[in-house]
Amino acid sequence: MPDRFYRPVLTLLILAHIAGAIGLLVPSLAPLFRSLVPYNLLGSLLLLLAFHPDWKPSFLFYCLLASLLGFLIEVLGVHTGFVFGNYQYGKTLGWALWDVPVVIGINWLMLTYCCGVIFDQFAIPVYLKTMLAASLLVFLDVLIEPVAIHFDFWNWFGAEIPIRNYLGWWIVSLVLLAIWYGLPFRKQNRLALPLLILQFLFFAVINMVFFLTKS
């Protein structure tokens, strides 16, 4: 996408995340904004990919692999409890196949893409890039979990979120990011860092509101 579209797209994403946070936190608006969550994820990914500079077959392979593998890992997790612990998805993330929302594969692609782009800029060994990017993704999940439970993204069968969940996120992220760094395509996208920052701010703000309203 031409550079002249960067600021309008970034502005759109900022406004969408602000509106989403407000909409989810206002009880009268929450049902509507919960129904929009899958479309927000899909729209964010499409805008992100619009700024990808290198559409080689290897990149298309990664997009397909990350989406499919992320989805199938979740199917395995939901039906066995082996990967992340015992949990089930709610209705918020939209249409599901085998009890897993299809959009969850999109989410794995978007998050690994953003984290992979960010750490590719550092002059460090690839194994360190992979580990740091996977750790950043797990840190984001720490913020996502309370919001996800509250808004019925997914729910855990137990009083607490198991440590296995975060370990599972790290291992799956590590595998996907190892493939990401191993494939020969350009890992640059000027929208990746702002989008990931918006994700962190979105979930951090909602968590802060939860904390303040419970105090």
Image (cartoon, rainbow, N blue to C red):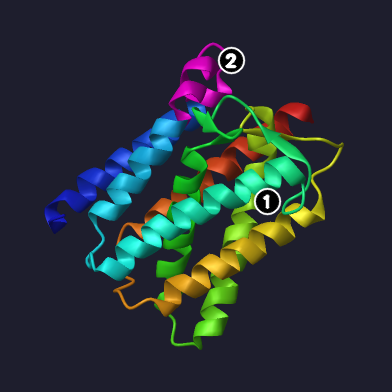
Q: Quadrant of the C terminus?
A: top right
Residues drawn in magenta? 23-37
**28 in magenta:** yes
Query: What residue does disc 1 label?
Result: 142
Instruction: Find the residue positioned furthest to the top.
Output: 28
Instruction: Find the residue positioned furthest to the right.
Output: 159
Q: CA distance from mark 1 to mark 2?
A: 24 Å
- Count neighbours of disc 1 (C-alpha within 10 A) and say few if under 14, some if 14 to 19, many if 20 or more: some
**Residue 65, how many percent across, how many down?**
44, 59
**Residue 128, how many percent across, how many down?**
56, 82
Residue 126 placement, left or right of 98 = left
Q: Quadrant of the N terminus?
A: bottom left
Query: What residue does disc 2 label?
Result: 27
- Mark in front: 1 vs 2: 1
Say which residue appears at 69% left-offset and 47% top-offset: 77
- The reply to whether residue 77 is visible in this rendering is yes
Front-lying residue, 90 or 117? 90
**Residue 9, how many percent across, how many down?**
25, 45
- Does 184 appear above or below 158? below
